[in-house]
Amino acid sequence: MGIFRATNGGVKGGEESIPHVGAWEDDSDRHSDRVNVYWRIVKEPQLTGMDCNKPWSAAFISWIMQAAGVPTTQFPLAEAHSTYIASIIANASEPRRWFVPRRISDYSPKPGDLICASRGKARPRFVNGYISASSLQGMSGHCDLVVGASARSLEAIGGNVRNSVSKTTLELDQKGRLQPSAKRPWFIVLENRL
């Protein structure tokens, strides 16, 4: 993962802090071209980091999965997080799935898992505490890859966080569960079973 520059930040007591210590992807062509690598994975080769109105965080996660050798049958490459989350939810009952949806109230994330939050006003609809794949249609979201965990905190990286690849430290509750906040309304963990 040394080919991108990360910024560090954290969420404590519901407040998010992500200071600018790395490179913004629209600072120069060198950084912008790096984002184009992510976009090419999802068949959008005309986009770069200079296209600031087009969120690239799902393309970044797709790039990570392709670089890790995850087949598209297990993790569909997508320009929107809701696309791959919905696919993983829809296929969860199939045998030998590499990613399985978990409720944040029941599961403690570990390195390799994806933690996902909604963005904007749209929120997923829960039925009996669970989310259907169809309820994610058109929803804006964001997912981070968990890269470190302790009993009370997680470290996660994500793309297009203030237009940079960023590392964030998150507080967990006493049971080691994610705590949704106003800035990051976490709603699902995608457990990595690799």
Image (cartoon, rainbow, N blue to C red):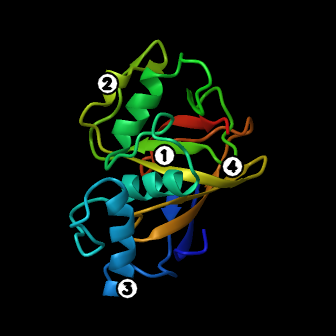
Q: Secondary structure at mark 4?
A: loop
Q: Residues within 10 Å of mark 2 (few under 14, many from 20)?
A: some
- Check the picture and name the quadrant holding the N terminus: bottom right
Q: Which mark is residue 111?
A: 4
Left or right of 72: which side holds 163?
left
Q: Residues within 10 Å of mark 3 (few under 14, many from 20)?
A: few
Q: Which mark is residue 135?
A: 2
What residue is shown at x 69% (from left), y 36% (from top)?
A: 108
Q: Which mark is residue 50?
A: none
Is residue 121 among the parts visible in the rendering?
yes
Q: Secondary structure at mark 1?
A: loop
Task: Residue lying at the far top in this picture: please name it.
Answer: 128
Q: Secondary structure at mark 3?
A: helix
- Residue in front for this viewpoint, 79 or 147: 79
What residue is shown at x 42% (from left), y 22% (from top)?
A: 90
Amino acid at dot 4: Pro
Mark 3 vs mark 1, CA separation in Å? 34 Å
Mark earlier in primary sequence (1, 2): 2
Mark 1 vs mark 2, CA separation in Å? 21 Å
Q: Are marks 3 and 1 in contact (CB under 8 Å)?
A: no
Q: Residues within 10 Å of mark 4 (few under 14, many from 20)?
A: some
Q: Are marks 4 and 3 in contact (CB under 8 Å)?
A: no
Amino acid at dot 2: Ser
Of labels 4 and 3, the one closer to you: 3
Q: Which mark is residue 181?
A: 1
What residue is shown at x 28% (from left), y 55% (from top)?
A: 43
Residue 147: x and y in percent read 66, 56
Mark earlier in primary sequence (4, 3): 3
**What residue sits right under mark 3 in the picture?**
30
Mark earlier in primary sequence (2, 3): 3
- Residue in front for this viewpoint, 87 or 167: 87
